Amino acid sequence: EIVLTQSPGTLSLSPGERATLSCRASQSVSSSYLAWYQQKPGQAPRLLIYGASSRATGIPDRFSGSGSGTDFTLTISRLEPEDFAVYYCQQYGSSSWTFGQGTKVEIK
Amino acid sequence: QVQLQQWGAGLLKPSETLSLTCAVYGGSFSGYYWSWIRQPPGKGLEWIGEINHSGSTNYNPSLKSRVTISVDTSKNQFSLKLSSVTAADTAVYYCARGNYGWLGYYYYYMDVWGKGTTVTVSS
């Protein structure tokens, strides 16, 4: 099973700042099957990025994804108040999905 | 606009079987995989398993011995059964659509989610 490790666990930033979230895989992951989700309290996760770098429908361009192999990054260029949430990376491989443990982006 | 509506028993006793159903409205049922994911209180997301319209399934190896996912294409519904539950199975359970295909590159992601069902296991 591929393990995804996200860092940092918590990111304390102010609105307007840049957020850089990391997702590292225990073995190489197909970029086609690497996605990022945002989850707010009491809500279901929302797809942000798929294929490592493609934005989902309706996602603002301040969200961007990059990476390949075992290292992937989600960047939020300028944090808006509604961006403070938990972010998960996810991968599909060998007929199985795994999620990272999440990074919480909180207001500093 | 595709919507997933899910329901099922919210309170179970240890050793009972968890049973949830998810209905798909406003879109095609075929051509996708349909997943169950859970989230224990204050913790992260765990994938449970998936099924397509033909009944082909994949399960999380750590839960495989207790999980059955089935499909009813006549109702555009899919269901989850998790047997022999314990307190460790207490979680919010989500259903989600797995969207896959080819656009010059392969893609597969979960783009539509249900609102979640809280399941508590307690004696």
Image (cartoon, rainbow, N blue to C red):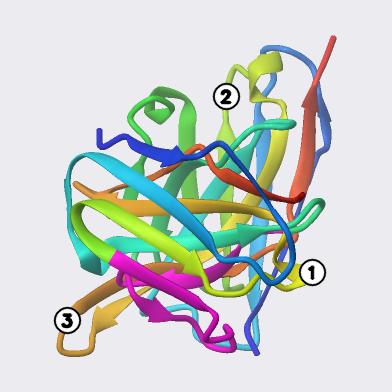
Q: Amino acid at mark 2?
A: Ser
- In the foreground, B90 or A20: A20
Marks 3 and 1 sit apart, C-alpha to C-alpha, by 34 Å
Could you tell me how many numbered marks the image carries?
Answer: 3
- In the foreground, A81 or A4: A81
Q: Are marks 3 and 1 on the same chain?
A: no
Marker disc for residue A81: 1
Marker disc for residue B83: 2
**Above or below, B70 relative to A8:** below
- In the foreground, A75 or B39: A75
Q: Residue at x 81, y 39 (%)?
A: B9
**Above or below, A26 relative to A52:** above
Q: Residues within 10 Å of mark 3 (few under 14, many from 20)?
A: few
Highlighted magenta segment, given as a residue range: A44-66
Q: Residues within 10 Å of mark 2 (few under 14, many from 20)?
A: some
Q: Amino acid at mark 1?
A: Pro
Q: Residue at x 37, y 48 (%)?
A: A23
User: Would residue A61 be counted in the magenta stretch?
Assistant: yes
Q: Quadrant of the N terminus of chain B?
A: bottom right
Q: What percent of the width, then of the height, locates residue A11?
A: 61, 46
Marker disc for residue A35: none
- In the foreground, B98 or A25: A25
Disc 3 secondary structure class: loop
**Above or below, A41 relative to B96:** above
Residue at image mark 3: B105
**Quadrant hosting residue A73:** bottom left
